[in-house]
Image (cartoon, rainbow, N blue to C red):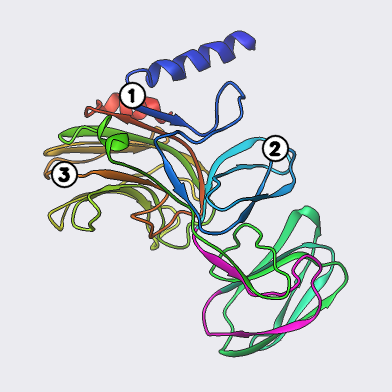
Amino acid sequence: MLRNRVRSRSRAIGLFSDAALNINFVPISGASPSLDSRITFTRSSTATYINSAGVISNAAINEPRFDYDPTTLSLKGLLIEGQRTNLLLQSAALSTQSVTVSATSYTLSFYGTGTITLSGAFSGALNGSGAFPTRSTLTFTPTSGTLTLTVTGTVQNAQLEVGAFPTSYIPTTTTASTRSADIASMTGTNFSSWYNQVEGTLYLQAQCISAVTSQTYLGIDNNSANNFICVRTSPSSTTFDRAQVTDGGVTQAALGASGYVATAINKYAFAYKTNDFARSINNSAISADASGTIPDVNQMFIGSERGSSILNGHILRISYYPSRLSNEKLKAITS
């Protein structure tokens, strides 16, 4: 068994040995994770995450969050989330209260065995199924008006947020509280020192917590929507991801591929040079395009496109090869 693990690790190291950029947010050795010094990370608020002991912990302003599974205690990777606001007050131990809502999607969540009964702008109930780490959630669309939340039993770390899925817990006291978006980027020589403007291959290992909205895993651009290379989800289907290249405002390639598993950890490889694009997910069949040009770019955003279309999920690994790898190797590195 140990010999098999050693062979597997050696094979993984060999596959990535010629990468010009190789950032692993889940260290193979079991070492504590850290942010590569070339990455600029900002978030203008505090935020919570699950620490290595499986406990909800607070991250300071501009502190990246390396999130762990609360049950297995395994490292999940760098957590990237968009901005959200918890509309409930005194969220740690919720009591009955009312909030003003509009006709859009909301998600209610909490830990505990109690019940939150909704009335007014929406009728329904969310029944708790256990203490932390068991989180009960309900996504619904109310009418505009006043929503009353009647609490019975134990309801802890409750959250009501605009959106079609729950995000990390946002503690509140006497007022609603907002968690700002996580923004991670590489610019200047931190980017240009490893990037080839003519051709390249991106490798990405990541997990999207919910695939119901358009979200970006990785975006490379020149601070313009007219020139970019990205890997993102599509809002039209939870089983369809794509890699896209736009040059001079014109889409050059937009490759979908089979093999994507919604909300799971997926491995992506996207290779490109002029008139030669290819992509594979999880060792799936190659998706290709034989026509298109490559834009000049100068920065990379991890988990967003210039701070928008933000991923709500985890980044485990990013690698970049300064050449267009063969289709065989695209499949090999995503197996």
Q: Identify residue for label 3.
A: 296
Q: Residue at x 79, y 72 (%)?
A: 94
Residue 269 — which label?
none
User: Which tag, 2 or 3, sits closer to the chain's start?
Assistant: 2
Residue 158 in sight here: yes
Q: Residue at x 17, y 36 (%)?
A: 197
Give neighbour class at mark 3: few <14, some 14-19, many 20+ (Cα, 10 Å).
some
User: Which tag, 1 or 3, sits closer to the chain's start?
Assistant: 1
Tell me: 327 left or right of 71. left
Tell me: 3 left or right of 171. left
Q: Residue at x 68, y 65 (%)?
A: 137
Q: Identify residue for label 2.
A: 52
Asked which secondary structure carries label 1, the reply is loop
**Which image quadrant for residue 125?**
bottom right
**Which image quadrant for residue 299?**
top left
User: Which tag, 1 or 2, sits closer to the chain's start?
Assistant: 1
* Label 1–label 2 contact, CB within 8 A: no
Give neighbour class at mark 1: few <14, some 14-19, many 20+ (Cα, 10 Å).
some
Q: Main secondary structure of the magenta part?
A: loop
Q: Position of residue 10 (x, y in %)?
A: 48, 13
Q: Residue at x 25, y 35 (%)?
A: 192
Residues in magenta, as a range: 82-105
Which amino acid, by three-letter code, is at mark 3?
A: Asp
Q: Identify residue for label 1.
A: 19
